[in-house]
């Protein structure tokens, strides 16, 4: 008796919490459902009022139309991939080295420098837009790949995240490694980084999404259509006086696919990181 | 948000001017490695916001190519820089970095900022050319007694109607309400209204009102005419003969969905008119108000940035005059861009008349050249627009009557105007 009376409320609260989670999931998924279903509708269905939730006949050719609408898609996708992957790789290397220095080394003014790093997170990006542009223009980088990549390879957030993670690596490991003749660099790349895969995956994923979704910056620093990115191409579908929503949503679906694939690949590590950071704060 | 952005841009522009004072501009010129005997063509960059994927952008690129073909001594390099807002951000940065283009497309509000920051040239064009442009359009681009831009892609507010629902497009305010009332049944309404400064503005001049006093020093939109105009549109929503659009919604969507039978909208949206029930649509000139037949105009202009070399400046002016000239504007308007010919002489051509005969919806643009009106081109006009929009929304929400709301907005507008001096 006692045991069932204990279990019943627990079961009830479990159902409740699952309901709440399911509701949250629906709210999160709804925009994606809307995008995908609109991508499969006819133009009339896409703007129908009252809302039509299901396309009567899926218009798969919308995707073909969306692809053909923008002859530069392949170029845009290449640019976005190239920029995103280069940015991610460079950022992870730089952030790992900086985070290691802040977490595992002792040097004069460490906390002050780290504090200054954190302070830069308080500066809104819009403020930096014009100064950054002037700097790049003086470097002669306008309309070139470095302008799309270099400003984004250092992320204080990534350094912060990795630093917190590195703190969890036991000091004994470092002592053992150093006893065996390892230096800082070797210890970082052979021991610390393999142990930090979840944190690295998180940093990489967030940066990839950020880079892939960037719109204003690529537009600002490029002039030729060949240098622009997927998001710039996507904006073509929204015009001054109206939009063809069904084709637009088909294009948006295509543009989302790479992010989805990368997320699925890194999913396991990402969850591990979220779960772990939740435990350790 | 809009206010903050406006402020930020104004600030950035002023910085650009300060930084640019006395400095020589680096512009995108052709390399100087030219043989002395053959004069290399002058290369000028042209930034615009007409997406090459749209009819607008495609036509523009074709016209630029045509210009380059016929002017061997000039090479214009067009670049699409995103929407007008993106174009403005980009231009602000480029001016600060001293890498602006020679010719830039700008909306009226953007032009005011450029003129204030002294980043665009006053234009000196022949009087014969000047008198050929639609008068209202030049008013919008003239500051003091100097012309700072040539009107390029200009659209007019027209009345678009569903031919299945409306046989004879209404010609006056009363007629419009009557038709709208007849259409209001079976979950449908006559028209769609937007509670903002533009929709109010469509009716202000028609009611005999003006935005500012004749000397431009005080607000005048809280006149009796202003009250009449605001009450006219607010009453449509109250009576249910008009649906009120929400922010970010296109009126054309309401129209295409078949929820309303008529809308007032810019002719630039012609390309997006497609009623889902498959019925045909027509366009007529906007109705005549109790006092005037004012046709509100909007769209963008062409300006030349300051600090160019003399030969570049000359080339830039040749290009801007050509693109907005009789042939240029005619080619632009007859490519079904939804924009109007900006030249009186273009309206007289057989080509335009034939085009209108074949595409009757463009008839609606005919009166725009004569009866066009524009909003004032004063500094911080956007701030005043925000105040007016607030007033209009208050009346739509029933929080204030038209007179009180407009008086309040006028008071704030006068404060802004006083600061401008």
Image (cartoon, coloured by chain):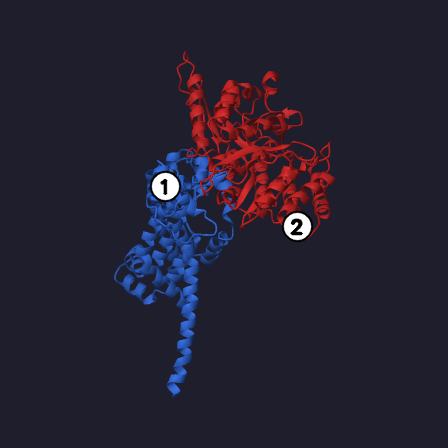
Chain colours: A blue, B red
Q: Residues within 10 Å of mark 1 (few under 14, many from 20)?
A: many
Secondary structure beneath dot 2 equals: helix
Residue drawn at x 67%, y 38% is B204
Q: Chain of mark 1?
A: A
Q: Is residue A82 visible?
A: no
Q: Residue furthest bottom?
A: A1
**Nearer-the-camera pick, B66 or A216:** B66
Q: Is residue B204 visible?
A: yes
Q: Residue furthest left?
A: A180
Vertically, is A1 above or below A49? below
Relative to B349, is A189 on the left or the right? Answer: left
Q: Chain of mark 2?
A: B
Residue drawn at x 50%, y 24% is B357
- Cα–Cα gap, marks 1 and 2: 42 Å
> Mark on residue B239?
none
Residue drawn at x 73%, y 48% is B404
| Quarter where residue B216 is shown | top right
- For label 2, the residue is B394
x then y, percent, for residue B224 = 74, 40
- For label 1, the residue is A66
* Co-location on one chain, circles 1 and 2: no
Q: Residues within 10 Å of mark 2 (few under 14, many from 20)?
A: some
Q: Residue furthest top?
A: B37
The image quadrant where one finds the C terminus of chain B is top right
**Nearer-the-camera pick, B66 or B296:** B296
Relative to A274, is A135 on the left or the right? Answer: right
x then y, percent, for residue A213 = 41, 47
**Nearer-the-camera pick, B414 or B221:** B221
Secondary structure beneath dot 1 equals: helix
Vertically, is A265 above or below B87? below
């Amino acid at each position: 008796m006692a045991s069932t009376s204990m279990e019943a409320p627990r079961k009830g609260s479990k159902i409740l919490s699952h309901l709440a989670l399911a509701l949250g999931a629906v709210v999160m998924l709804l925009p994606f459902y809307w995008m995908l279903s609109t991508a499969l509708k006819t133009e009339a269905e896409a703007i129908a009022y009252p809302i039509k939730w299901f396309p009567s006949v899926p218009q798969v050719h919308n995707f073909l139309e969306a692809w053909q609408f923008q002859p530069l898609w392949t170029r845009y996708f290449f640019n976005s991939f190239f920029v995103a992957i280069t940015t991610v790789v460079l950022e992870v290397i730089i952030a790992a080295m900086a985070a290691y220095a802040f977490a595992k080394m002792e040097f004069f003014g460490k906390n002050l420098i780290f504090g200054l790093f954190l302070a830069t997170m308080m500066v809104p990006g819009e403020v930096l837009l014009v100064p950054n542009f002037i700097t790049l223009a003086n470097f002669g980088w306008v309309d070139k790949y470095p302008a799309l990549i270099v400003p984004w390879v250092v992320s204080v957030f990534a350094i912060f995240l990795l630093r917190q993670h590195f703190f969890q690596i036991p000091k004994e490991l470092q002592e053992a490694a150093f006893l065996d003749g390892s230096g800082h660099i070797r210890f970082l790349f052979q021991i610390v980084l393999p142990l930090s895969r979840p944190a690295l995956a998180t940093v990489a994923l967030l940066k990839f999404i950020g880079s892939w979704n960037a719109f204003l910056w690529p537009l600002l620093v490029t002039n030729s259509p060949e240098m622009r990115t997927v998001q710039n191409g996507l904006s073509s579908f929204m015009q001054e006086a109206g939009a063809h929503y069904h084709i637009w949503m088909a294009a948006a679906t295509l543009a989302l696919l790479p992010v989805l694939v990368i997320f699925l690949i890194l999913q396991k590590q990402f969850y591990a990181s979220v779960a772990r950071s939740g435990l350790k704060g | 948000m809009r206010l903050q952005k406006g402020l930020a841009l104004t600030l950035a522009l002023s910085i650009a001017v300060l930084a640019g004072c006395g400095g020589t501009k680096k512009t995108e010129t052709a390399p100087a490695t030219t043989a002395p005997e053959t004069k290399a063509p002058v290369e000028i960059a042209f930034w615009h916001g007409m997406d090459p994927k749209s009819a607008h952008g495609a036509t523009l690129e074709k016209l630029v190519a045509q210009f380059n073909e016929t002017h061997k001594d000039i090479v214009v390099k067009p670049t699409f820089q995103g929407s007008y807002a993106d174009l403005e951000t980009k231009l602000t940065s480029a001016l600060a970095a001293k890498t602006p283009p020679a010719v830039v497309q700008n909306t009226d509000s953007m032009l005011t900022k450029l003129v204030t920051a002294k980043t665009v040239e006053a234009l000196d064009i022949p009087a014969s050319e000047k008198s050929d442009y639609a008068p209202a359009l030049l008013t919008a681009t003239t500051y003091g007694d100097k012309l700072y831009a040539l009107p390029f892609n200009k659209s007019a507010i027209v009345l678009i109607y569903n031919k299945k629902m409306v046989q004879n497009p209404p010609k006056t305010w009363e007629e419009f309400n009557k038709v709208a009332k007849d259409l209001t049944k079976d979950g449908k309404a006559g028209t769609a209204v937007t509670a903002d400064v533009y929709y109010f503005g469509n009716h202000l001049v028609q009611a005999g009102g003006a935005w500012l006093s004749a000397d431009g020093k005080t607000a005048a939109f809280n006149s009796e005419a202003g009250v009449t105009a605001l009450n006219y549109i607010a009453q449509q929503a109250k009576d249910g003969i008009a649906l009120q659009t929400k922010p970010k919604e296109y009126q054309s969507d309401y129209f295409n969905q078949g929820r309303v039978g008529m809308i007032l909208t810019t002719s630039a949206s012609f390309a997006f008119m497609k009623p889902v029930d498959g019925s045909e649509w027509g366009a007529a000139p906007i109705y005549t108000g109790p006092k005037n037949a004012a046709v509100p105009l909007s769209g963008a202009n062409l300006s030349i940035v300051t600090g160019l070399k003399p030969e570049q400046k000359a080339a830039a002016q040749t290009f801007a005059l050509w693109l907005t000239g009789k042939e240029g504007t005619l080619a632009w308007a007859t490519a079904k861009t939804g924009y109007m010919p900006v030249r009186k002489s273009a309206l007289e051509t057989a080509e335009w008349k034939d085009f209108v005969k074949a595409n009757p919806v463009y008839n609606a643009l005919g009166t725009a050249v004569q009866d066009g009106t524009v909003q004032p081109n004063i500094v911080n006009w956007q701030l005043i627009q925000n105040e007016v929009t607030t007033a209009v929304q208050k009346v739509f929400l029933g929080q204030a009557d038209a007179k009180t709301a407009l008086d309040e907005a006028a008071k704030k507008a006068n404060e802004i105007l006083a600061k401008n001096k």
